[in-house]
Image (cartoon, helix red, strand yellow):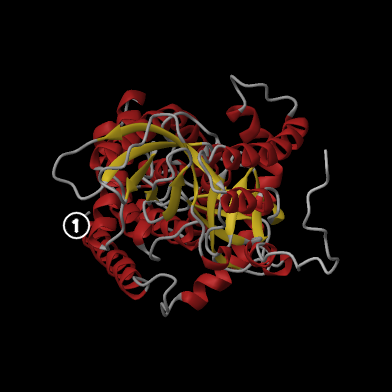
């Protein structure tokens, strides 16, 4: 990953983290909210592979944890999103070719991020409510994420294409 | 390819260890964490950014959350919401049931006597957590300090957690870490309300034999000096009562008046009327004029 791309990744996740807290979480949608940051991390991982996904997850998670509207220990979202970015990057070869595969990956990543956050929070002594409500909000968020994913994936793809030589998924690196 | 894979693994390890170290260092968030300085600086920078973005994107959020409702006349709705707040408050206080004259006196004095700083909610939540915290666009320069009650046109929103110069962080009543002492209006029972992150709030009544009916209003019990919670703020309505055997307390679900995911205009109670009430309940000075003790002939 070049310095230019690292900068681009930083810009993308910064926009995602800010928009998540100022717009997405406040839409008042029934039973939950989309997790834009997770979608962007998955999109970067799909576009460029595990290293970019991990860096995006770390930077985005750290920034989200630093926002004054978040109240958990610094690094908690970063820890979860690093793993999300890595897994999405590793699985990108399996989901190429179909839109449905990418959307499924986004949905799975959202559920994994939500349950991972709840489990990690549990270890740190944070209450997260009943597990049934955690599961319900995770599944609802996964649905919303699958809805916004086509636009986010397309946007990140376009940005990547213009940012320099594209590395087509599935090609040996 | 192999070298690439190894580099990826090293990167994964480094990033995971870095996150883990940060979490460990910042574990005691807000209670003397070594990273509090970093957080304060970040809040000072990112809070205004959030406020700016929220100001630009507010129409978008309003349009979406307003679908199904009348989203066009929001300015008028704000004004009505403020009027409604005062009326609801009076209503909740009036419904206290068989109140003593002292209670009525206190309630009358309390209605509408909170001094409030209006603020707009600019951001909700941050990372992936299940916490319900929000940023508002009023801060220390507006007279805010930690542990003040935050209300909206409908009822209790939460309490101020931390303050920067221009923004403040609010712990919402829906947060699983939030605990609010409350009184059930008609029966007068007291209990504690805890957030559940999603869905209704959970009310634990202190008396296991308390009789609470569905639909009763719940208001805050109040803390000494009105911090963190001022007395008499409407919270919600009892939705479902559980009578679990073998529990020391009785549990009920409370539907909050406030829709936490679409909050906009809130007020921070910077002065609760407690001290004024205490003085007001002193008996009046005896009348120096001597009255005749013999009743007038009819």
Image: B165 above or below A80: below
Q: Is residue B5 left or right of residue B191?
A: left
Residue at figure coordinates x 64%, y 56% from the top left: B268
Residue at figure coordinates x 26%, y 35% from the top left: B242
Query: Which residue lies most toward the top here?
Result: B68
**Which quadrant is the N terminus of chain B positioned in?**
bottom left
x, y percentage for residue B71?
68, 25
Viewer can see residue B233: yes
Residue at figure coordinates x 35%, y 29% from the top left: A103
Number of other residues with Cα within 10 Å of mark 1, as a class: few under 14, some 14 to 19, many 20 or more: few
Viewer can see residue B153: no
Residue identifier under label 1: B2
Image: B101 above or below B39: above
Quadrant assignment, res B144: bottom right
Quadrant assignment, res B211: top left
Residue at figure coordinates x 44%, y 45% from the top left: B188
Quadrant assignment, res B87: top right
Q: Is residue B277 left or right of residue A61?
A: right
Query: In this view of the protein, which residue sits in the foreground, B121 or B186?
Result: B186
Query: In this view of the protein, which residue sits in the foreground, B147 or A62?
Result: B147
x, y percentage for residue B30?
44, 71
x, y percentage for residue B251?
29, 42
Secondary structure type for disc 1: helix
Query: Which residue lies most toward the right here?
Result: B289
What is the number of callouts on the image?
1
x, y percentage for residue B184?
44, 42
* Chain where mark 1 sits: B
**Which quadrant is the C terminus of chain B positioned in?**
top right
Query: In this view of the protein, which residue sits in the foreground, B213 or B178?
Result: B213
């Amino acid at each position: 990953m070049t310095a230019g791309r690292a900068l681009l990744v930083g810009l993308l996740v910064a926009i995602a983290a800010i928009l998540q807290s100022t717009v997405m979480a406040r839409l008042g949608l029934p039973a939950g909210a989309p997790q834009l940051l997770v979608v962007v991390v998955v999109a970067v991982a799909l576009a460029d592979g595990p290293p970019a996904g991990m860096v995006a997850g770390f930077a985005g998670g750290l920034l989200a944890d630093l926002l004054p509207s978040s109240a958990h220990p610094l690094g908690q979202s970063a820890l979860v999103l690093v793993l999300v970015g890595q897994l999405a990057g590793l699985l990108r070869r399996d989901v190429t070719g179909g839109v449905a595969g990418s959307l499924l990956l986004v949905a799975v990543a959202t559920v994994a991020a939500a349950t991972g956050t709840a489990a990690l929070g549990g270890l740190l002594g944070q209450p997260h409510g009943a597990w049934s409500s955690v599961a319900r909000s995770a599944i609802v968020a996964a649905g919303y994420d699958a809805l916004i994913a086509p636009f986010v994936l397309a946007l990140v793809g376009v940005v990547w294409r213009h940012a320099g030589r594209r590395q087509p998924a599935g090609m040996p690196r | 390819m192999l070298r690439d894979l190894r580099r990826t693994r090293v990167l994964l390890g480094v990033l995971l260890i870095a996150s883990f170290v940060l979490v460990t260092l910042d574990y005691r968030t807000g209670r003397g964490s070594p990273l509090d300085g970093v957080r304060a600086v970040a809040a000072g920078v990112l809070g205004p950014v959030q406020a700016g973005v929220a100001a630009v994107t507010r129409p978008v959020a309003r349009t979406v959350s307003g679908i199904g409702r009348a989203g066009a006349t929001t300015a008028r709705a704000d004004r009505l919401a403020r009027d409604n707040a005062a009326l609801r408050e009076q209503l909740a206080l009036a419904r206290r049931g068989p109140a003593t004259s002292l209670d009525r006196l206190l309630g009358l004095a309390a209605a509408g006597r909170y001094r409030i700083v209006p603020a707009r909610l600019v951001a909700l939540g941050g990372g992936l957590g299940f916490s319900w915290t929000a940023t508002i666009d009023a801060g220390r320069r507006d007279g805010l300090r930690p542990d003040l009650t935050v209300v909206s046109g409908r009822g209790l929103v939460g309490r101020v957690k931390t303050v920067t110069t221009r923004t403040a962080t609010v712990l919402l009543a829906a947060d699983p870490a939030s605990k609010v002492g409350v009184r059930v209006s008609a029966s007068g029972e007291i209990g504690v309300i805890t957030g559940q992150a999603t869905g209704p709030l959970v009310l634990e009544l202190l008396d296991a034999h308390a009789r609470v009916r569905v639909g009763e209003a719940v208001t805050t019990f109040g803390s000494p000096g009105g911090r963190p919670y001022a007395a008499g703020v409407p919270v919600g309505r009892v939705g479902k009562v559980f009578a679990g055997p073998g529990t020391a307390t009785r549990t009920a679900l409370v539907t909050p008046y406030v829709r936490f995911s679409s909050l906009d205009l809130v007020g921070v109670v910077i002065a609760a009327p407690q001290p004024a009430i205490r003085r007001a309940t002193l008996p009046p000075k005896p009348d120096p004029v001597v009255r005749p003790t013999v009743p007038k002939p009819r």
